[in-house]
Image (spheres, grey):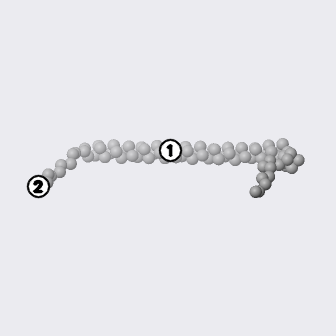
Amino acid sequence: MLAMGNAYPASGNRKQFSSVSSVRGDTAWDQEVDTERVSLIEENARLRALVVQLSNLVLRNVVDQHSASPMQPLRRSLPD
């Protein structure tokens, strides 16, 4: 049977981080997250604008079809 090691190192073995380097790392990470968030918001706005354009085109096309030729029921001949 294999012996399991301690998942958490003893306090003497832990790497100590200075508060300055930790803050710099957090700030850089926050800025990256903020930049990505802004990019997603901008892309979302562009996609919404495209959806509005597409919806307007579809509606315009439907209205044009209905005003150009009124729908008439198709008449089928009955089989003999």
| Kind of residue indicated by mark 1 | Ala
- Residue 78: mark: none
Element class at badge 2: loop
Residue drawn at the location 25% of the way across and 44% of the way down = 70
Q: Nearer the viewer, residue 3 or 57?
A: 3
Q: Which label was assigned to residue 80?
A: 2
| Residue found at x 38% / y 43% | 59
- Amino acid type for the residue under numbered disc 2: Asp
Q: Nearer the viewer, residue 31 or 70?
A: 31
Task: Quickly name the residue at label 1.
Answer: 49
Is 47 placed left or right of 67 in the picture?
A: right
Answer left or right for 74 relative to 65.
left
Measured as percent of width and height from the top left, residue 68 is found at: 28, 46
Work out which quarter of the rendered image holds the N terminus and state it: bottom right
- Report the Cα–Cα distance between label 1 and label 2: 55 Å
Classify mark 1: helix, strand or loop.
Answer: helix
Task: Estimate how packed mark 1 is, as few (under 14), some (14 to 19) or many (20 or more) residues with alpha carbons within 10 Å.
Answer: few
Residue visible at 76% across and 44% down in the picture: 26
